[in-house]
Image: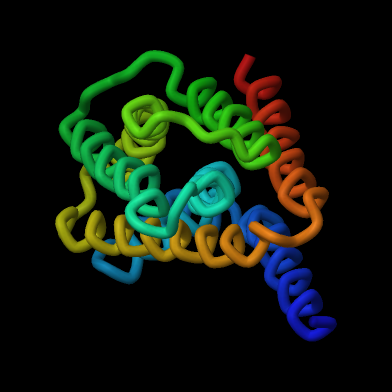
Amino acid sequence: KPMRHAAIKTLALAALALPLAALAHTGADAGSHHHGFAAGFMHPLTGVDHLAAMVAVGLWSALAARRAWPDLLWAPLAFAGMLLAGALMGLAGLQLPAVEPMIAASLLVLGLLVATRIQLPVGVAVSVIGLFAVFHGVAHGQELAGEHGAALTLAGMVAATLLLHAAGIAVGWALRHANAWLPRVAGAGVVALGVTLLAQAA
């Protein structure tokens, strides 16, 4: 048991460190004109807001799941699918109002979901997660507009998104029976980031 508890704490600390690592690399691809699968894969990892949201979706899915299958997958698949739809909209030049405030709001909501481990009906969860994912996707699409090889770039972006969801799910599943304060700390960190970004966007 001590080894299991140590592993859980290590995984939790790694999850909490992911947004900090992303913050240290924020802007690494800003202004870059690189394209292709690798560039798309790195794209979600260079913004702390996107990375935190994607990990939080996985965390909440695992923490709030009534059963492993299919509850773990509804929110991550909704986020990835609508992120891609939003990215295609952004690439096409579609403008949505309040993109940055909505991204910040998504962190607030996702952080609260992680901290409270609240269980939502599937339809509500998919709708809420999908709506926020559209704004994350539009932001990515607008950044990538005008780039060549958009299909490969988007494929890499979606692959990274799914990987981040999987990382969140793995950590969240490990924390399901751990001390309740660990998920609350993770959720509070995401909420704090959302509040900061919302204040900046105001």
Picture quarter containing residue 75? Answer: top left
Q: Quadrant of the N terminus?
A: bottom right
Which residue is pictured at 78% across the width and 54% down the height? 182
| Residue 103 is at least partly visible in this image | yes
Q: Is 22 on the left-hand or right-hand side of 1?
A: left
Q: Is 24 on the left-hand or right-hand side of 93?
A: right
Which residue is pictured at 59% across the width and 58% down the height? 172
Q: What x and y, as percent, mark residue 71? A: 39, 49
Q: What x and y, as percent, mark residue 173? A: 57, 62
| Residue 34 is at least partly visible in this image | no
Q: Which of 173 and 66 is in front in this view?
A: 66
State the residue lying farthest toward the bottom.
3
Which residue is pictured at 33% across the width and 70% down the height? 38
Q: How is the image coloured?
A: rainbow
Q: Which of 22 and 93 is in front in this view?
A: 22
Q: In this view, does 4 lie above or below 135?
A: below
Q: In this view, does 51 lie above or below 99?
A: below
Q: In which quarter of the image is the C terminus?
A: top right
Q: Nearer the viewer, residue 95 or 194?
A: 194
Labels in figure, total: 0
Q: What x and y, as percent, mark residue 134? A: 33, 32
Which residue is pictured at 33% across the width and 38% down the height? 137
Picture quarter containing residue 17? Answer: bottom right
Q: What x and y, as percent, mark residue 42? A: 42, 63
